[in-house]
Image (spheres, grey):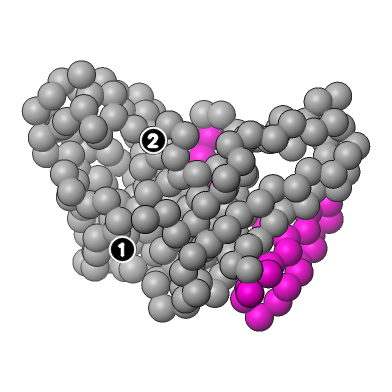
Amino acid sequence: DQQVKQNSPSLSVQEGRISILNCDYTNSMFDYFLWYKKYPAEGPTFLISISSIKDKNEDGRFTVFLNKSAKHLSLHIVPSQPGDSAVYFCAASADNQGGKLIFGQGTELSVKP
Amino acid sequence: NAGVTQTPKFRILKIGQSMTLQCTQDMNHNYMYWYRQDPGMGLKLIYYSVGAGITDKGEVPNGYNVSRSTTEDFPLRLELAAPSQTSVYFCASSPDGISGELFFGEGSRLTVL
């Protein structure tokens, strides 16, 4: 039972263009959503998050959009840079779960110069 | 600032052997977690702890044990290693267990032959 799904295993984008990574969830109890970035041989690092009371959160080149009715969120990276090439994980948590995160399978982003 | 430190980084075990993965954090975080990541999959929660002396099971606890005698340390014990436990293991910590923002170690790659 995959509660958080990232259906695209990989994405290739040209430098300077927009990268859009998608994530779907099934559990309506989730109320906090996060994106993590992971380079090879390193642990994941926190990138950006959004609470269920919002539909958009921006941090520099990164914007996360949340559509609660569709149980869908997306991460936009504009403009994409070669250093953004990494695996991106979507994660979700419920308020009463002690910070336990449920992760998606990840999307490997490749930004080509 | 060391953050979350995991040892060893790599280990090969024979079926039936036992070992302990060590995890230490120097951020005085109450919440700590162990995740495993299999190829092409997201991170799955094995065990977590909300403070010294308190531990609880995650999504995939079978075959593992944990203890939390101090705030800093959260070791993960494999008693009878099986090939299904071949994975990359990540330890993480969080200050409050509310926001879901976790700080991860670099990971420990375990192979069971």
In the shown orientation, is residue A101 left or right of residue A19? Answer: left
Q: Nearer the viewer, residue A39 or B6?
A: A39
Marks 2, 1: nearer the viewer: 2
Label ID, residue B38: 2
Q: Image point 59% across, 67% down: which residue?
A: A71
Q: Chain of mark 2?
A: B
- The residue wearing badge 1 is B49
**Which amino acid lies under the numbered mark 2 shown in the image of this protein?**
Asp
Q: Chain of mark 1?
A: B
Q: Is residue B112 above or below residue B59?
A: above
Q: Is residue B2 visible?
A: no
| Residues at marks 2 and 1, CA–CA distance in whole angstroms | 22 Å
Q: Nearer the viewer, residue B42 or A83?
A: B42
Disc 2 is placed on an element classified as loop
Q: Is residue B46 above or below residue A95?
A: above
In the shown orientation, is residue A57 left or right of residue B46? Answer: right
The disc, 2 or 1, on the residue closer to the chain's N-terminal end is 2
